């Protein structure tokens, strides 16, 4: 969805990145890596947790609507 917004010019990458403490868009592999971790023995004692893979977006307090 984000890629679609970028391609349509509905929002700029610069506008999004300014809300991300890591100052960059994350690769799609990061989401897969999180899923692999949660499915691995390393996560055997993790229950009832939402793993946010967003470069700090939610910790920064950015709204879900990047254009606001």
Image (tube, helix red, strand yellow):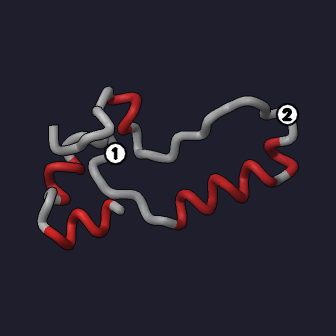
| Residue 29, quarter of picture | bottom right
The crowd level at tag 2 (other Cα within 10 Å; few <14, some 14-19, many 20+) is few
Classify residue 36 as left or right of residue 22.
right
Q: Say which of marks 1 and 2 sits in front.
A: 2
Q: Which mark is residue 45?
A: 2
Instruction: Please determine whether, in this image, residue 34 is positioned above or below residue 19.
Output: below
Residue depicted at 16% across the width and 44% down the height: 67
* Residue 66 locus on image (x, y percent): 23, 43
Instruction: Please determine whether, in this image, residue 23 is positioned above or below residue 29.
Output: above
* Residue 15 locus on image (x, y percent): 15, 49
Residue depicted at 44% across the width and 64% down the height: 27
| Residue 22, quarter of picture | top left
| Residue that carries the numbered disc 1 in the rendered image | 22
Residue depicted at 32% across the width and 38% down the height: 64
Question: Which quarter of the figure is the C terminus placed in?
Answer: top left
* Residue 2 locus on image (x, y percent): 32, 60
């Amino acid at each position: 969805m984000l890629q679609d917004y970028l391609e349509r010019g509905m929002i700029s990458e610069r506008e999004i990145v300014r809300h991300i403490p890591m100052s960059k868009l994350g690769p799609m592999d990061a989401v897969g890596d999180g899923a692999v971790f949660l499915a691995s023995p390393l996560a055997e004692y993790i229950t009832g947790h939402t793993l946010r893979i967003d470069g700090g977006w939610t910790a920064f307090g950015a709204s879900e609507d990047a254009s606001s």
